[in-house]
Every structure is written in C-alpha cells, then in structure tokens.
C-alpha cells in the first residue's frame, strides 16, 4: 500500500460571486489525510469547514461558486480536473457523505431500503436480490434492529438517531475509502450522539475508512479525532494531533475555542466579537480583530508564515521544528514569549497553506 496520503489538499480556494462582492469562503487551505485516519475540521460557524468538505467532491453550486485555485489530490488524482461522469463515479463510490440533517437527506416517499439500494446500484452490478441483501446487511452494520423488516420502512418511521444511522448506511453502501461527515450529531441529544460517535469508531475499525469530521463541538473532536485542523474565516490557523491541540494549543484562536469549554469552575470564556466579512476580510492574521495578543505586525500584510512546533515532548520524538504540529501566527517568529507555555516553533513555509497538513501519521 502506498505511503502517500489518501487525500492531499493544496492551497484550495473556493469563492462565491455575489452582487455584494466575492465571498472568499475557503482561501488557501492545505492539509493531508492519511489512510485509516480521522481528521476533524473545527471552527466557528462560517469558518469555511463545510465549504472545504464540499469542495473535495465538487459539490459547490457553480455558479455562483467557483474553485478559484488549488488542488484536491485524491489517491493520486486531482479531483478538480475530473469530468462530470468521473465525479459521479467518485461520489458515493470511493467518497461517501454524511450530511448534517438526516431528515433532509432522506426522501420521504421512498423506503430506506430503496434509497440504500439506489446508492448500491449506482456503483455496483448486483441483482435486485443481492442489492436488497446488501441493504439489510448495511442496516445491521449501523445498528438498526430487525433490519430485515425495517428495510421496507419509510423515513418517518425512524427516530432522529435511527435516521442518521440510515444516512450513514447509504454513505457506506460502496465501502468508500473516504467518509465525509458534516456535523452528523448536531441535532441529536447527548445519548444518541455518543452512540453515533461510537458507531463511527466501530465502522472505521471494520472498514479502515478515512474520515473527515466537520464539527464546531470540541467535545466531539476529543472523542473521535486522530488529528485536528483548526479553521477561521477561510484559513487554517493550526493543525496537530488531538493530543497536541488539547494539551498544547498554539494559536490564540485555538486557545480561545478551548476556553469556551466548561472548566472545573463551570466558567465559560466566550470569544469577543464575530467572524469578519468573507467579502472584505482584514489584512494580516484574520483573527487579529478578536485576539488579545494582537500587535501591529498581526494587522499588516498577508496571513502569517507557518511555524512547526519544536519542543513537543511526546511519543513521536518529533522536536526538530518540522513536525506535524503547525501554526500560522506571527508570535512564533524568532521565539516570542507573549504566548506562555507553547514551546519553540520554527518557520517552515511562507505561503498560507504551505505545511499546514495532517499527514505523516502511522
């Protein structure tokens, strides 16, 4: 098996042209995903997480949307160069999607079995009997009891959590190499959420599927992530393993997100202000208007260079400044001590997306 990443995104730019101007929803994003790895993309609503995931399989409505630049390399092929027929083969075949709202993802006039078989039949040459048997097997694999009977039920006959399981079954119909899950637990209560997260872990172990998990919930990240990509206003602020992000957050935005979590004292520290306009984003670091550490250098020029963490004392032994914990923040230029307890970072790239990736895992 190749040691290359399954997915490699380089300097991805996805824009939307509106009457008010060009919305730079994704503006120079780069990261990798290894085979069998779970990567969580985290950030506030409007950070560009979902648009990034939709850009992978070109689900952006064009117009008004446009992939304005960059590459999306999936298993050696640049997805941005594929024809419509090739994209249809890719979607649902080698890349599956689990969307946020299962109610909207399921057609109320067809049985769940029909909708699963539709996904199967689009990519596999099976008899009707074989297709039905596989649909039942998929429902069983996602924990639907009495799947042989429920395969003929309609979506309204399922609870919210069971609907989400059906949507996951559809996404897994052709055993994809990559599963993209966009806020799949947002509308679920905490008990059902825990069950769905456990289901994702079990399915990944069974199918060795790579997973992109889109979420704004850091509690979910802690449960499922191998690696984390922190996005803000269309840019990647920081990447690292889940342990690195939670135990040694480097970017002020990542720290601010973590401070929003309830601590032992029960206090919460909301981030002041709101995301900038994606049409007229601020110069320099896009987080600087809300950053307590902002200085003049943060406000000018382009997004700061990328710095690799040097001094993370973990099991990888990676402390040479070229590790997989990386941050785009001017405070790490020349060893800045304004951000305490962050270790040493050294510059590894000048372009906003260069080196901000999640590759290099076992």
Image: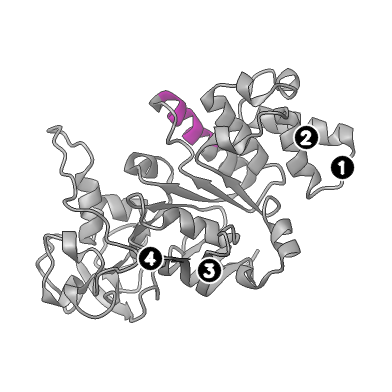
Can you tell which quarter of the image residue 342 is in? bottom left
> Residue 353 appears at what percent x and percent y?
39, 73
Residue 134, labelled with which disc? 2
> Quadrant location of the N terminus?
bottom right
Residue 346 vertical position relative to residue 31 in the rendered view, above or below: below
Q: Main secondary structure of the magenta part?
A: helix
Task: For mark 3, give the secondary structure.
Answer: strand
Q: Which residue is mark 4?
A: 20
Upstream in the sequence, badge 4 or badge 1? 4
The Cα atoms of the two marked residues, 4 and 1, are separated by 49 Å
Residue 231 vertical position relative to residue 27 in the rendered view, above or below: above
Q: Residues within 10 Å of mark 3 (few under 14, many from 20)?
A: some
> Residue 117 appears at what percent x and percent y?
77, 37
Q: Residue at x 69, y 18 (%)?
A: 146
- Whether residue 34 appears in this view of the structure is no
Residue 66, labelled with which disc? 3
Q: Are marks 2 and 3 in contact (CB under 8 Å)?
A: no
Q: Which residue is mark 1?
A: 126
């Amino acid at each position: 098996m190749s040691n290359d990443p399954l997915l490699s995104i380089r300097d991805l730019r996805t824009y939307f042209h509106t009457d008010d101007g060009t919305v730079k929803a994704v503006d120079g994003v780069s990261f990798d995903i290894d085979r069998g790895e779970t990567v969580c993309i985290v950030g506030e609503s409007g950070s560009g997480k979902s648009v990034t995931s939709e850009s992978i399989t070109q689900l952006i409505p064009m117009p008004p949307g446009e992939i304005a630049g960059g590459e999306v390399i999936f298993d050696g092929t640049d997805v941005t160069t594929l024809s419509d027929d090739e994209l249809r083969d890719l979607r649902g075949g080698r890349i599956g999607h689990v969307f946020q709202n299962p109610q909207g993802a399921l057609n109320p006039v067809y049985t769940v079995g029909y909708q699963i078989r539709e996904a199967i039949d689009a990519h596999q040459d099976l008899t009707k009997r074989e297709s039905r048997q596989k649909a039942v097997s998929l429902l069983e694999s996602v924990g639907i009891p009495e799947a042989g009977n429920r395969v003929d039920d309609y979506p309204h006959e399922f609870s919210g959590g069971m609907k989400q399981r059906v949507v996951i079954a559809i996404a897994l119909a052709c055993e994809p190499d990559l599963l993209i899950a966009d806020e799949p637990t947002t509308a679920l209560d905490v008990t059902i959420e825990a069950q769905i997260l456990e289901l994702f872990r079990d399915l990944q172990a069974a199918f060795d599927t790579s997973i992109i998990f889109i979420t704004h919930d850091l509690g979910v990240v802690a449960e499922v992530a191998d690696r984390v990509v922190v996005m803000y206003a269309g840019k990647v602020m920081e990447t690292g393993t889940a342990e690195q992000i939670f135990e040694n957050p480097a970017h002020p935005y990542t720290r601010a997100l973590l401070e929003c979590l309830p601590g032992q004292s029960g206090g919460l520290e909301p981030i002041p202000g709101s995301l900038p306009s994606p049409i007229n984003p601020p110069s320099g670091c896009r987080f600087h208007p809300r950053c307590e550490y902002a200085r003049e250098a943060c406000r000018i020029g382009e997004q700061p260079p990328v710095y690799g963490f040097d001094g993370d004392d973990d099991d990888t032994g990676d402390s040479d400044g070229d590790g997989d914990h990386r941050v785009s923040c001017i405070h790490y230029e020349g060893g800045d001590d304004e951000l305490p307890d962050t270790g040493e970072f050294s510059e590894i790239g000048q372009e906003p997306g260069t080196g901000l990736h999640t590759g290099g895992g076992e």
